[in-house]
Amino acid sequence: MLAEHRIGAVVVSTDGIRIDGIVSERDVVRALPEHGAGLRDLTVADIMTSEVRTCTARDTVVALADLMTQNRFRHVPVIDGTDLVAIVSIGDVVKARMALLQDERDQLIEYVQQ
């Protein structure tokens, strides 16, 4: 699924609402040395990360960037209560931070020119 959809992570959920885990490219790579070609016979549950760090739509981009940087992961599920509503990638965070910085820059230039 990761390769087919050209994505870096998939949230695992038995009911499509609650998060049971997450499988990323890193999980696959980490399982390779131990299982080799036998990796193909494992289930998602065998390699997924079960303790998933999440965020909410109310979290700031800066807080999310800090969470991802400190914990060294690139994908964070977004929840509403306990329900999965989206997933945010490090690319999304970088894009949002760049937009914020550009806005700040534009405001400073406008202020200085007045």
Image (cartoon, grey):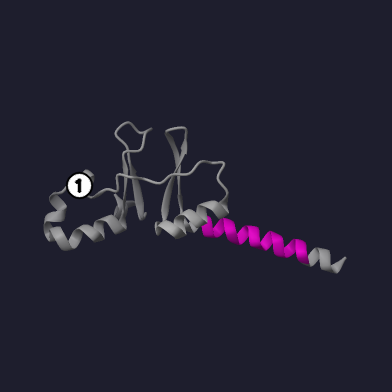
Residue lying furthest front: 70
Left or right of 68 in this view: 98: right
**Where's residue 50, x and y in %?**
30, 44
- Residue type (three-letter) at the residue carrying disc 1: Asp
Residue lying furthest right: 114
**Where's residue 73, x and y in %?**
39, 56
**Where's residue 61, x and y in %?**
56, 52
Magenta range is 92-108
Left or right of 15 in this view: 74: right
In front of the other: 5 or 28: 28
Q: Is residue 32 magenta?
A: no
Q: Image quadrant of residue 21?
A: top left
Residue sitting at x 32%, y 31%: 15
Residue sitting at x 50%, y 57%: 66
In front of the other: 47 or 95: 47
Left or right of 60 in this view: 32: left
Q: Image quadrant of residue 72?
A: bottom left
**Where's residue 14, x and y in %?**
29, 34
Residue sitting at x 85%, y 68%: 113
Q: Secondary structure at mark 1?
A: helix
> Is the residue marked by circle 1 packed among few (<14), some (14-19), or many (20+) residues within 10 Å?
few
Q: Is residue 105 magenta?
A: yes
Left or right of 34 in this view: 84: right
Judged by its main secondary structure, the magenta piece is helix
Asked if 35 appears above or below 13 in the picture, the reply is below
- Mark 1 sits on what residue? 46
In front of the other: 106 or 49: 49
Quadrant holding the C terminus: bottom right
Residue sitting at x 58%, y 49%: 60
Q: How many marks?
A: 1
